[in-house]
Image (tube, coloured by chain):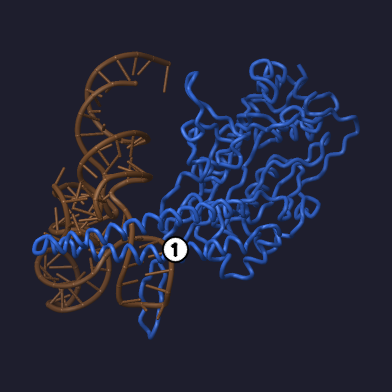
Chain colours: A blue, B brown
Amino acid sequence: MIDINQLKNNEQFRARLLERAPDLDVTKVLELDDNLRKERQKNENLRSERNVGTAKIAELMKTDKIRASKLVLDMKVVGAKIELGDRKIAKLENQIFDMLAKFPNVPSSGVVMGYKEANKVVGSFGKKPEFTFKPKDHVELCTSLGLIDYERGTRMSGSGHWVYIGSGAMLEWALLNYFVDFHTKNGYKFVMPPHLLNYESGYAAGQFPRFMDDVFFVQRGQGTKFDPKAAKFLAPTSETALINMHRGETIPGDQMPIKYFGYSPCYRGEPGGYGASERGTIRGHQFNKVEMFIFCNPDESTMFFDELVKNAEELISGLGLHFNTVALAAGDMSAAMSKTCDTEVWIPSLGYKEVSSISNAICYQARRANVRTKIAQHECSDGVCRKVVKTDYAHTLNASGLATSRLIPAIVEQFQNEDGSVDIPPVLHKYMHGITKLTPQ
RNA sequence: GGAAAGGUGGCAGAGUGGUCGAAUGCGCUCGCUUGGAAAGCGAGUAUACGGCAACGUAUCGCAGGUUCAAAUCCUGUCCUUUCCGCCA
């Protein structure tokens, strides 16, 4: 949710927003907002009148019952007016909210306009492997190495599901352990959130109501009428849970930043068929992901964005994989984000595929989730300094760190040998119980 | 899952229709006192929105209702605690 005051008073803000989304009816929202302010003022005055009258009645009750009962009649009329005004206000608020909820975040400075084709590679790491033989694709490799059983996954749960088995499960677990160690060393706090989240959490994360069809709702038992506000849904990413760690809270500024990393399986509807480019584990209904999430003071989010990008890059570099970092154009970022970089790992049979998405939501998510920060400042005038505490919305950032389901394809394809074996990245050895090389079974 | 009790400011805790944005205590801030500290004394101390300000409005878990007037009465709901049941 953007700040309507910014929209109203900050021309640059408005221009930049309209550049990202030219069709927004800004005039209409501001007009509604103007009406709202007027109606509110009107009603506040009426309330004030009633408060005065009510106090008067209390006093008159003791001395002059007749005048008191006359006043009661007057106040009834005022009360009716207030009720009418309240209805008008509620209607305006809803209209404004509905419109504003669809407004995307304002792109940070430096973010280029345009769509996917305007994305720009800003970093390239490692070397693209060159094969002296015909490389196999990840589905073939994972099958021949006995890492993943696609068919049995489909049998159990339908398309978009797979089973990690044996050294495949171990490799998956090793990656997660590697991430956990990395983030812990960097001072991030480990969070294992519930997988089932309530409606309010989905709303605060900015996923509802828009993406309600993309998540899996669950309810207990059968025959109960489905009610999305009462049902729970499976987290599509632990980000959804992490933003809600501090929903509705005001965090003292000196406790910022709060750096979390969460692990959860991610459950997603992913409607539509899977093309050849998304075979295997590239896109599924359930995958594992570790997510970094930062709450910080407004002036720090730019700095932490860079930190998150660096962390994601180090994680992938650590595995020895070749990948690019790409700055997304405004049209390719999700609506809630002000700035996004993707890291795209090289999967020889497919090209570059996103494994991490790093975003700065600035105050957009925090407004929705109502997360604030209290910042103490020293304000000096005439040589006298005073401590002034200001409350402002926090900034939030998130970054995958990382999703495993595209890393395994990248690992098996980039590190494959002619004989069909695959070398395991050295950083994972300590989690692999002595396995350093995967060989066909 | 069943039963009971309860949700009030940073914390504890009073308040059962008007004098309540809310006693009192603790904590915190500033000042006095002191060589310094403690104690003592005095003043202050919730948040949001609107307004240059004076000030106004709203908020006692949440949502409705009754009333001229609700922390207080009524209904629903969520959460917490305790007891019982069931259980990985």
Residue at screen point 56% across, 46% down? A206
Most extreme residue toward the bottom, as rendered?
A: A382
How many numbered badges does the structure rendering display?
Answer: 1
Q: Quadrant of residue B77?
A: top left
Amino acid at circle 1: Glu
Quarter the C terminus of chain A occupies = top right
Q: Quadrant of residue A290?
A: top right
In the displayed structure, does residue B52 sit left or right of residue A239?
left
Mark 1: secondary structure: helix
On the image, the x and y values in percent for residue A114 come to 77, 56
In the displayed structure, does residue A5 sit left or right of residue B54?
right
On the image, the x and y values in percent for residue B53 come to 36, 77
Residue at screen point 73% across, 55% down? A329
In the displayed structure, does residue A335 sit left or right of residue B72?
right
Task: For residue A430, say whether it is visible.
Answer: no
Task: For residue A426, say whether it is visible.
Answer: yes
On the image, the x and y values in percent for residue A134 come to 90, 29
Q: Which of these two is toward me, A335 or B16?
A: B16
Count residues near mark 1 (Cα–Cα under 10 Å), then give few for <14, some for 14-19, many for 20+: some
Q: State the residue position of label 1.
A: A39
Q: What chain does badge 1 belong to? A: A
Q: Quadrant of residue A39?
A: bottom left
Q: Which of these two is toward me, A84 or A167?
A: A84
Q: Which of these two is toward me, A409 or A30?
A: A30
In the displayed structure, does residue A1 sit left or right of residue A330?
left
Residue at screen point 65% across, 55% down? A339
Q: Is residue B3 above or below residue B68?
A: above
Residue at screen point 84% across, 28% down? A136
Quarter the N terminus of chain A occupies = bottom right
